[in-house]
Image (cartoon, rainbow, N blue to C red):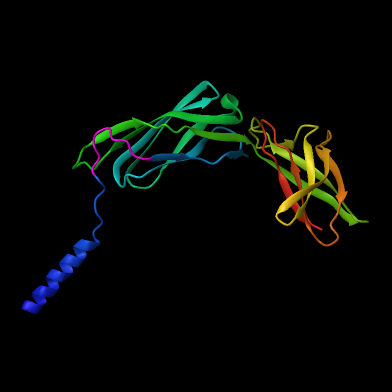
Amino acid sequence: MRLRALVSVAALVAGALLVPAPAQALEQDEVFDVKLSAKDIRINKGGCQDIPYTATHTQGVLESFSLGSYVYAKDRELSFTFSKVENSAGPLKATWFWCPSNYGPGTFTLKQNQVRWMLHPDLPTTGQFMLKQELKQTLKQDSKAKVSKVAKRRGRVSLTAKVTHFNLLDYTNAWTRVPKGTKVKLQLKKGKKWKTIDTGRVGKKGTVKLNGKAARKKATYRVVSSASKRTWSATKSFKR
């Protein structure tokens, strides 16, 4: 009996060592680390949409964690956004609402970011503070490039490239040719770098012909269109 009792006590002690220690208790209005992050967006569908970003904190499990932010375009205030997560130590997957007809493409800033938090109901401590960080996020029309009539002869590679972009104001999800004059480069991969071997500009039909000095052996090439204030650049790779 004594041996069995000793084994039980040892098991209890070992089990207690495996229980994670609770997060340090917060004082009211205490500030802790919060980091905002977001990816730039290539708009390729029409209409208004929720734009995602993330708030990550270091305080462990909170009864609730919320973030209120003001969205700006340059110095113009556009809207207010609010997101909340409960009973979680993970990141807050937040969103702000964007409409192409009201805001258009561009770089947007989330600032005056206010955090509100609450501990477990048994420890009903709450607090709030302002973040120093401002989050910038760029939204522009997606674009894509295609190549055709690719040929390699007499030490040169030639092709026709067509570049289109998504028209964010077209609710039929239409892709259309980029503006006439858009610059397009033909590049050859050398090691980890790219060398420009020809440059042209898109014509009124959205196409451009390119012709550059080719590598002697089979190599990787790409066409790259330039970006604009409204549209991201586009890249298309091929081998010859």
- Residue 139: x, y in percent? 59, 34
Q: Is residue 142 left or right of residue 71?
A: right
Name the residue rendered at 80%, 32% in the picture: 180
Residue at the farthest left position:
1
Name the residue rendered at 55%, 32% in the picture: 48
Residue at the farthest right position:
154
Q: Toward which corner of the image does residue 238 lie, by quadrant?
A: bottom right
**Can you say which quadrant of the picture contains the C terminus?**
bottom right
User: How many labels were placed on the picture?
Assistant: 0
Q: In the picture shown, does residue 167 fall above or below 17?
A: above
The reply to whether the magenta stretch includes residue 26 is yes
Q: Is residue 117 left or right of residue 3?
A: right
The reply to whether the magenta stretch includes residue 85 is no
Q: Which residue occupies the foreground of this view, 37 or 64?
A: 37
**Can you say which quadrant of the picture contains the N terminus?**
bottom left
Q: In the picture shown, does residue 109 fall above or below 25?
A: above
Q: Which residue occupies the foreground of this view, 4 or 131?
A: 131
Q: In the picture shown, does residue 230 fall above or below 212?
A: above
Q: Toward which corner of the image does residue 209 lie, by quadrant?
A: top right
- Residue 19: x, y in percent? 23, 59
- Residue 235: x, y in percent? 72, 46
What's drawn in magenta, residue-wise? 25-33
Name the residue rendered at 87%, 51% in the picture: 213
- Residue 225: x, y in percent? 74, 40
Q: Is residue 93 left or right of residue 31?
A: right
Q: Toward which corner of the image does residue 137 lie, by quadrant?
A: top right
Provide the major secondary structure of the magenta segment.
Answer: loop
